[in-house]
Amino acid sequence: MKLNNTHHAAIGALLACTTAVPSAALADDLNVILFSMPYTQGLDQLEADFEEKTGHTVNIDVVGQDVFESRITLSFTGQTGDLDVVHTPVIQVQRWIEAGWLQPITAAVDAMDTKDDILSGPLDAYLVNGERWALPFFAETGMMAYRTDLLADAGYDQAPENWAEMLEASAALKANDQAALAMRVAPGQGFNMFVYPMIMRAYGGTFFADYPTDLTPNMNTAEGLEALDVYASLMNDFGPEGIGNFNFGEVAAAMQSGQVAMIVDGTSIVAQALDPDASQFADQISIAAVPTGPNGRSPAIAVHGLGVPADAPNAEASFAFIEWATSEDVLTKIALMEAYPDFTRASVAQNAEVIAKYESIHPEFLNLKVQMLGDAIGHYRPLLPQWPQMGATIGENINAAVNGIMTYEEALETSDQDIADIMAE
Amino acid sequence: MRRHDMSVKQIAGVIMMLVFLAFTFLPIIWAIILSFRPKTHLFEPIWQSPAQLTWDNFDTLARSDFPFALFNSLVTAGTSTILAMIIGVPAGFALAKGRSHRKFIASWALLLLRMAPPVGFVIPLFLIYLNVGLLDTWAGLIAAYMVLTLPMVVWSSWTSLSQIPDELIEASLLDGATLFQTLYKVVLPAARPGIVATAVLAFLIAWNDFFFALIITRGDTVTAPVAIMNFVSYATVDWGSIALASIVLTLPTVPVIIFANRYIVQSMGGAVKG
Amino acid sequence: MQSYQGVQPVFQKNYNKMLYPAVFAVGVFAIVPLLGMFALSLTDFHLIKSWDREFGLANFIRLTQDRRFISSISVMLMLSVFGVIFQVVLGTLIAVGLEKIVPRWRFLRGIFVVPFVVPAVAVALIWLSLFTPTLSPINAFFDIFGITVPAFLTTEYGAIGAIVIADTWASYPFVMLLILAALQGISSDLDEAASIDGATKMQIFWRITLPLLKPALLMVALFRFIETLKHFPLIFVMTNGGPGRSTQATNYYAYIQTFQSSNVSYGAAIAVFLFVFAAVISFYVAKANARLTDA
């Protein structure tokens, strides 16, 4: 049913008065919005350095992740022009580009004399449609942390190498009355959908029939089912009480307080578990590679960077900030200040102080991280504009399966249906 | 001596009240404990390491945006309450004592505004603010809070001012006072409990708001309930600071409610007696 | 009464004047955004794809076919109905306890009312930590006796129960205050007369006090019902709508559609549904209220 022309005019006028001219930019020279993580917290403290160096005043706003999403969505849509630099996760970049929310920074990046120092994987993750859209400051991958003492009690002198062994070791730990493994289960594109594909892909499961050429939904397969079964058993049979609502915060806390023997999560969470200031059992915690499956290993990957919103009034100043914020000097400072092993420049990884700091946490940490990054595939989570919405929905289904609200088949079947619906929109 | 008089039923009653007291207080005590625990012992039961306490979270809180956000909360919730009182109380008075055929519509509208989904308000509000430059300003947030506080104030002052005897108003009017003078010099002093209760309830609504502030503030006017969420960072959830911030956010209102609860009871009394 | 009719009409005009500022303010602050909501719900204002100026009822047709929307209504109603029941029962028991059972404890009223002022975000965060078994002191305590407290947030009804408990904790004081007010309005003569007639305290409570409290109970239940329909921070912080989608109440679903899936106008259509629903409920609340105050 359609409304008549008078109605159109009336509603149009109403909308016009609510969506007309953007307001003037806000007082500060540069407004930067970031979501809270060790790097951004460190950057916030270095604000004065940038002001001193460039003469621009800058207002760095570090907010919680949920707050961030609500904020930027409306700023972008409204084209408020109030943001000069925005935290740009790779996982969102396609969606933002399609919507016209970012402006390319290709020429400026190519003109940088230290461009080659930036790790090429994370840098090229922002190469879309032949243009560069952000500079990376964070490249996280998957890793395992485990309690050497608890595994020794259960008869293991090293961490499980594959997911089948993980199940056995978990059973042995369980026999000792010890919760074995914690992973994220809480529903969300960046929550359970950050860790679950590590198991799914290890068993040969995929989201699509043949990404990126054939985007037929493909989650409901024998491989997909087996992977979900492994994940759900690990969580339900051997995980700690309440695992079905765990997010990264609870995963980190469970390891730090000695409630579980193993976690498989992102490197920044593993670094928290190794941090003696936060972790009660730091000296008994060791690290290992993400377990493999019949189809090999697929460590999680998450890259975050800084981009320039399409409506940012002064693109040059924005880029000057990004260049400074991702410079060797700043990354090194933050790597030393915070638990931030996920820096994105080769020179930082060679810095003696940085090496010494992370070796003192665990001698193998940086090497293992490089190895995991090498094993990770760029499209660990599909790089599609629709992914954020799709990932959220699939995450709900997987969570429902783990918590017994859907059967495994139902969850996968529903996910395939949801993927198809979202692609068709 | 009197102990002997206590029947089984009374003892059961006392036990019931103690259980309720525990239900009320244990979460608060838990938050207080959390705010003093060092990161390494955060979730260890307090009886296992009672000596492990720290002031660290106070430093973290002091260095964060939280004190600034608390100030923003105070200004915006306070101002919108005052404005809503100035505009709303006369309206409540008019509805209580004036003769109107639209009283039912008015009460319906007030309740509807109380119930209306915030998601529905906030997006158009965002788009409007964008155009008139009210995003991330105190004025914008105060105006948004009027949506919450004004219906509350009109409704609550309407019920409490209904209890003022007509004779009192009559007398004042016959003495030659105007209606406004009557309201401010005669009615309001007589209705003090109701007016205090109204202001307190309105303030609490704005003070507790999360959703409006989430959408229409930025770094300059962020309020405390939103700032608490900033302690949930990627990597760790800083429970100690969260607990401390929750306590700090609650503290200013505790004396208010302890002082004002009898006024609330008094003013509600009239409403339910009819 | 005679003077009332004599003097008041002269002032009726002035009474009306007192209404104007409030009517104007409501118009500006509330009606304009609400009209915007209605307008948005009739368009295709997708955040990503640029919005074409086609107006129609497509969003509303989609609502009728959206299973998630329909199940969100039942989640919303469960949260509201159970929440209201628990809050009213607990609030009434405490009020009656303070007033009738242990009147010497009346001073505790100021204590029982404290959760009322804890902001919803703080309520949600505190209860989230209490409901996470690995973090919770409740679980640690019962572990000493070898009792495993089940995880609430990982089962469909457990998660709803957890939100209801947190909401009950924060909201029973409101009920308690209103019931205290009502109890003080009930004359103690009736109680005394009944006890002279040989009625026990229990009988007095069930036969006399409770029936007299009925209007107040109805009123407070309706008020709480209104508030619980708007749950946001508790869901947002404690469950993210999970496990699965079992705590995605309608208001939260509108938020998800708007901000997570960028379907602004579909979100607005859900908000319009909620608004119409609110209009119906508040109509009956207003009627109930009119009957009570006219009585």
Image (cartoon, coloured by chain):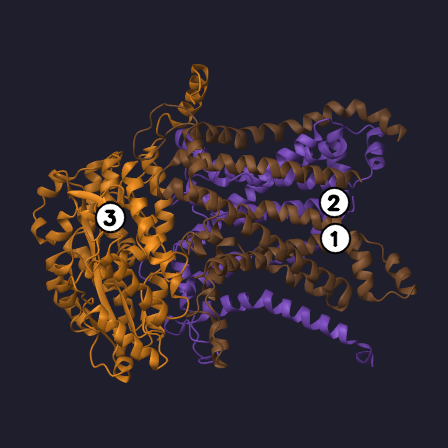
Chain colours: A orange, B purple, C brown
Q: Are marks 1 and 2 on the same chain?
A: no
- Identify the mark at residue B48; answer none if there is no mark: none
Whole-number angstrom distance, CA of label 1 to CA of label 2 = 9 Å
Q: Please, which chain is the residue tagged with disc 2 on?
A: B
Which residue carries the number 3 mark?
Answer: A91
Query: Residue sitting at 24 percent across and 57 percent down?
Result: A222
Whole-number angstrom distance, CA of label 3 to CA of label 1 = 55 Å
Q: Point out residue A56 in the picture as x, y percentages from the top left corner.
A: 25, 42
- Tags 3 and 2 touching, CB below 8 Å: no
The amino acid on which the numbered mark 3 sits, given as a three-letter code, is: Ile
Q: Point out residue A274 in the picture as x, y percentages from the top left corner.
A: 26, 71
The mark tally for this picture is: 3
Near mark 1 (Cα within 10 A), the count class, few <14, some 14-19 or many ≥20, is many
The amino acid on which the numbered mark 1 sits, given as a three-letter code, is: Ala
Which residue carries the number 2 mark?
Answer: B271
Near mark 2 (Cα within 10 A), the count class, few <14, some 14-19 or many ≥20, is many
Which residue carries the number 1 mark?
Answer: C181
Near mark 3 (Cα within 10 A), the count class, few <14, some 14-19 or many ≥20, is many
Q: Nearer the viewer, residue A324 or A416?
A: A416
Q: Quadrant of residue C111?
A: bottom right
Query: Residue sitting at 69 percent across and 44 percent down?
Result: B195
Q: Are marks 3 and 2 on the same chain?
A: no
- Tags 1 and 2 touching, CB below 8 Å: yes
Q: Is residue C279 left or right of residue A169?
A: right
Residue A242 position (above or below residue C258):
below
Mark 2: secondary structure: helix
Q: Is residue A316 left or right of residue C49?
A: left
